[in-house]
Structure formats: C-alpha cells, structure tokens
Image: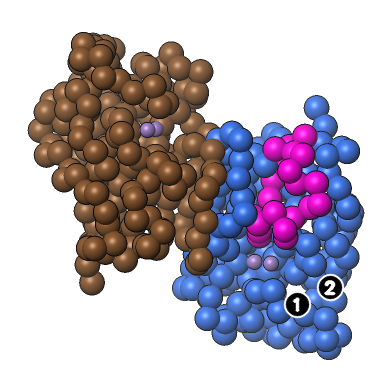
Chain colours: A blue, B brown
Amino acid sequence: MSKILVFGHKNPDTDAITSAISFSYLKNQLGEKTEAVALGELNEETAYALNYFNVAAPRVVETVANETDTVYLVDHNEAQQSVADIAEVEVASVVDHHRIANFETTNPLYYRAEPVGCTNTIILKLFKENDVVIPKNIAGLMLSAIVSDTLLFKSPTCTSEDEAAAKELAELAEVDLESYGLDLLKAGTNMGDKSAEE
Amino acid sequence: MSKILVFGHKNPDTDAITSAISFSYLKNQLGEKTEAVALGELNEETAYALNYFNVAAPRVVETVANETDTVYLVDHNEAQQSVADIAEVEVASVVDHHRIANFETTNPLYYRAEPVGCTNTIILKLFKENDVVIPKNIAGLMLSAIVSDTLLFKSPTCTSEDEAAAKELAELAEVDLESYGLDLLKAGTNMGDKSAEE
Ligand SMILES: [Mn+2]
Ligand SMILES: [Mn+2]
Ligand SMILES: [Mn+2]
Ligand SMILES: [Mn+2]
C-alpha cells in the first residue's frame, strides 16, 4: 500500500507544516506508513523553526491522488483550503481547531477537533493518549506552532490548554519559552510574509 | 444561562437515546448544565434498556431554539437527521461514529468522531480521559447501545474496541453480557420496530 499523506492547508503557516510533521510522526510510531507533505513553500517563520530544530522541510505537492488513495488532514478541513484533488481521495483522519465547513465524507472517519488555539495542542493530547514519547525536535516544532498561532498567548483564540501545552513542550524541547518564542515571531515578521489566516 | 440540550438523531435508536444520557451525565459531572432530550419516542428495545436499568426516558422535543442557544449532538451530525431548527442554534460539541455530511458550523467546536461501531464506545473513552466514574445504570445503558448498534458484535461495523468496551461496561453494569444482550435484542425484534438506520 502507498503511504498515507498528511498535510495542512494551502499557504501553510507554522501550525499547518508542523502539525503534519508531528501527526505523521505519531502515526508512524503507531505502526502506520505516513508522510508529511506541504501544500506550499515554507514562510520565514516556519523555516526558522525547522532550521532551529534541524528538521527537513516536507516536500511540496500539488496533487495527491496520483500517489495515494488515503490522506489525513491537519489544521484545516474546508475543501477550498485543501489540496486541489481532495475530492478524489479518502480523508480518513482530521485533527483541527477550526470551524467545520465544506467538508463531507462517504465513510466514517477519525475526526478530532477542539476549540483551542492550535492544532498541535490537540496533537500533544494524542501523543499522551497513545503513550508515545515526543522527541526533542518534534516537541520544538509543536511548541513553535503554538507560539505562532497564539502570538505567544496573546491571541483571543488562545486557551489555558495552549499555554500549558507550550510550557510542557518547551521543557521537552529544552528551550526558554519566552526568548525562543520572541525570536520565532521576529523571524516571521522580519520578512513581512506572515499570513493573516489565523 | 439555559441548559445545553444533548440529543441523538430523529427516529432514535438505543445509541441515540443512551449516548445523549451518558454524554449529558459526563458533562454535568464536569460542571456543565446539560439535559439529555430525544427527537422521538423510544423504540421497544430502548424502552427495555431504560426500564432494566431504571433510568427515566428523556423528554421528547420538537424544537430546541425556543429553550437554548447551544446544543451537543450525539450519534449523528447530518442536519436532515437532526432537530428541525438545528440551524438556529450553535452546535458546540459532536460525538459520533458516522460519516460527516451536511454539517457546518460558524465557530470552532469540539468534534469527536471515530470509525467504531457505536457512539457509546467513544463516550467510554471520554469518561476515562476525564477521570469520571461511570455509575452502574449509565454503564448498563452504554452497554445496551453497543449491543444494539453491533447486534452483539455481529455487524460489519463492529470493531475490537466496541467488544472490549462492552465487556468493560457489562462488568460495571453487573450483568452477563451474552444473556442480557440477547434479551435486549429480543425485546427490540419482538415488537418489529427496530429501525434499519444503522
Ligand atoms: Mn493554520
Ligand atoms: Mn492552526
Ligand atoms: Mn443511531
Ligand atoms: Mn450509533
């Protein structure tokens, strides 16, 4: 069987890229064969995080049905934010923190959405529920997503769960939350390409 | 604030009724104010289960917007299976094991779907994740739903998780799984009103 592809939304932000990486890592630890891919190039903030934690950028895909029949969505569900040929594959799992719209499946699926500030806050729970250890570099990426989506806990969508998750991940990543967080946000704003999507 | 109403689909089966009861119980233990209601009268199988475990039938509602602005859906998500005025209220949580279709929200929500045989198999996980003890009568209702949805583990939708959940719930409910299960299914078929919905 071909690999299940895992990806976030188009015009990817740090959560879209890193939640694909963290969810794919979790699934592979659980015995599945998945690959994190991206629906666009990294922005400067995400590139900073991947470089800092020494993780390779996921390859960019334009379509998926040419290589798999099953996909997992992270950080989005709406068809217009997804891959162009999303209608041609089966969405077997979604992990997301947005409203649900323009989303429909033929079969039952795994869908995990919570009204929190970041997809990686939910993925942290999934690691715990499945008793999978989070390596330092994956924890750093997950932390980066929470910092990015919540603007270091200042966004109105930020919850106490996001803040607690970030603190826990900063310890695992062995970074100082405040100083790493500010450096990360600065890396994004420096280049002026941070999307207003979230 | 008015109570949040929790309900399963129209033409309710045992899972629709009892997952409303079990999810509402869980939420109330967690400090929320919710009430399980029903979108139709009990079938004979469900009446047997409620009577056996001495739990009152949820009241039947035709509309919900006249008494609340927020609802939790269990065992369904599609608008045509839901209450007539579903578009007038906010769906803040869904726990379900069906495909997703004709479902859309304005805001982020809690959505928990898994491809298992019964909503109550998922709700059992939620009790554990939240460290809430399941009383004997609620466990009996949850068990009844799994027996009903999986036809005592014979349906093609039944998973090993459903079977394990049923065994665990039968112990909590202090009933013999096989003999109670057969009596329950018999109570439904006797009256010839078991819906083919699931
Ligand atoms: Mn995003
Ligand atoms: Mn996000
Ligand atoms: Mn049902
Ligand atoms: Mn069901």
Report the side of A158 relative to A134 (left or right). left
Whether residue A78 appears in magenta in the rendering, the answer is yes
Q: Chain of mark 2?
A: A
* Residues packed near mark 1 inside 10 Å, few (<14), some (14 to 19) or many (20 plus): few
What is the three-letter code of the residue carrying label 1?
Ser
Query: Which numbered dot is residue A43?
Result: 2
Determine the CA span between mark 2 and mark 1.
Answer: 9 Å
Residue at (86, 85) in percent of width and height: A191
Q: Which mark is residue A50?
A: none
> Where, quadrant-wise, is the N terminus of chain B in this rendering?
bottom left
Q: How many marks?
A: 2
Secondary structure of the residue carrying tag 2 is loop
**Residue A139 horizontal side relative to residue B186, left or right:** right
- Across and down, in percent, residue A55 comes to 84, 60
Q: Which range is magenta? A: A69-90
Residue A98 percent location from the top left of the image: 57, 63
Q: Secondary structure at mark 1?
A: loop
| Along the line of sight, the residue nearer the viewer: B35 or A45 | B35
